[in-house]
């Protein structure tokens, strides 16, 4: 709560006409982020693999007030699509103000099955594709003094069962972008990086994945989306949503045994 109160309020005018690329926006939290940007009259490019879904989201973005809304289907497991997506966005938008790195590869919620090749694939989709897009977008973001919003998870900070490969990719994101934040600041390269730590959110994918495996209460995707946009626009280095993720993160190194007991009481081996 203290964190919430200390937050400066956003001059929403600053979002008017913002040029934004949102990945993983064919559904879930990314879709909701696109709709919030649209309400501010943003110029939007969205991406994901499912063209039909992207077309629907673009249609609704225009209805909600987006000045421009385009899509490009792409698969982030490819080592070239991430670059193609940013090139497309720069071409359509004539620059970039917000880069929202949100997509993740399909991930199951279960005990690790020993499949290292799946982890290699997930590292490309959830981590390396983010770095590829960052590399490609940085010159335009420096030009616009823009923001990078990296969607991470509580799983990248507090280690829990059933998501080991996913946790590895989120931990990698937290480490890489946590370090890059310092490098950009030290070089006075005025691009902000906002690392977002989300707790369980009520998207279809997540609800399907966790079914019967956890007693965690999910939070609404639309609110998670808005909190991350606000944090990015305010150039905050971190966003925590819901606020409980801030409390857990803050206290995570205290009473480790107590923490481990609480975690294992929230996850169930048998449904
Ligand atoms: N939901 C939750 O409980 C939590 C979510 N988060 C984070 O929030 C973000 C969004 O999660 P959420 O909205 O639940 O996820 P969803 O499964 O609802 O959406 C994932 C998005 O990524 C796209 N995607 C999936 N695979 C690929 C691929 N190979 N290449 C390109 N795009 C792909 C999907 O589109 P398509 O299938 O069309 O490709 C979809 O648009 C993720 O970074 C996740 O880690 C963090 C903590 C909790
Ligand atoms: C992995 C999936 C079910 C959902 S759950 C998640 N992050 C997360 C949040 C809270 C606790 C455990 C977690 F793993 N991120 C997701 O995309």
Image (cartoon, helix red, strand yellow):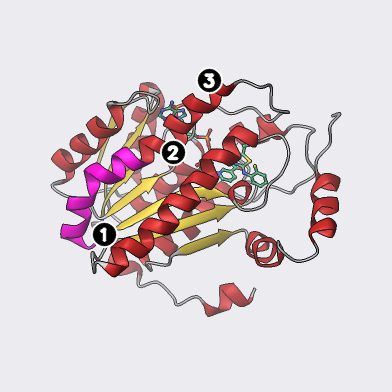
> Are the residues tagged 3 and 2 within 8 Å (C-beta)?
no
Relative to 70, say whether 219 is above or below: below
Crowd around label 2: few <14 · some 14–19 · many ≥20 (10 Å)? many
**Is tag 3's residue or tag 2's residue first in the polypeptide sequence?**
3
Instruction: List x then y, in percent, for residue 206.
Output: 63, 36
**Is tag 1's residue or tag 3's residue first in the polypeptide sequence?**
3
> Are the residues tagged 1 and 3 within 8 Å (C-beta)?
no
Q: Nearer the viewer, residue 95 or 108?
A: 108
Of badges 1 and 2, nearer the viewer stands 2
Residue 62 can be seen in this image = no
Task: Check disc 3 and report the residue beneath it.
Answer: 117
Numbered disc 2: secondary structure: helix
Residue 22 can be seen in this image = yes
Q: Nearer the viewer, residue 79 or 84?
A: 79
Q: Nearer the viewer, residue 59 or 74?
A: 74
Position of 227 compared to 111: left or right? left
Magenta region, residue range = 131-146
CA–CA distance between discs 1 and 2? 21 Å
**Is tag 1's residue or tag 2's residue first in the polypeptide sequence?**
2
Main SS category, magenta section: helix
Q: Nearer the viewer, residue 230 or 80?
A: 80
Task: Check disc 2 and report the residue beneath it.
Answer: 127
Of badges 1 and 3, nearer the viewer stands 3
Quarter holding the N terminus is bottom right
Task: Check disc 1 and report the residue beneath it.
Answer: 146
Residue at 26% x, 44% y is 135
């Amino acid at each position: 709560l203290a964190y919430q109160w200390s937050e400066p309020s956003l001059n929403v005018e600053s979002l008017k006409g913002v040029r934004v690329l949102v990945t993983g926006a064919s559904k879930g939290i990314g879709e909701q982020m696109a709709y919030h940007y649209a309400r501010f009259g943003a110029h939007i490019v969205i991406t994901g693999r499912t063209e039909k879904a992207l077309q629907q989201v673009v249609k609704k973005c225009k209805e909600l007030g987006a000045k421009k809304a385009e899509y490009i289907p792409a698969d982030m497991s490819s080592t070239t699509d991430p670059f193609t997506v940013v090139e497309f966005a720069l071409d359509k938008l004539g620059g970039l103000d917000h880069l929202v790195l949100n997509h993740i590869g399909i991930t199951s919620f279960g005990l690790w099955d020993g499949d290292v090749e799946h982890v290699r694939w997930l590292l490309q989709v959830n981590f390396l594709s983010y770095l590829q897009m960052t590399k490609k977008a940085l010159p335009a973001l420096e030009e616009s003094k823009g923001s990078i919003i990296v969607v991470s998870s509580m799983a990248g900070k507090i280690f829990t069962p059933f998501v080991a490969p996913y946790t590895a990719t989120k931990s990698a994101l937290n480490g890489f972008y946590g370090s890059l934040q310092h490098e950009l600041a030290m070089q006075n390269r005025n691009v902000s990086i906002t690392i977002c730590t989300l707790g369980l959110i009520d998207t279809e994918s997540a609800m399907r994945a966790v079914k019967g495996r956890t007693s965690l209460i999910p939070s609404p995707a639309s609110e998670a989306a808005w909190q991350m946009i606000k944090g990015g626009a305010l150039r905050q280095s971190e966003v925590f949503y819901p606020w409980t993720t801030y409390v857990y993160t803050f206290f995570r190194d205290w009473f480790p045994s107590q923490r481990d007991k609480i975690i294992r009481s929230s996850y169930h081996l048998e449904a």
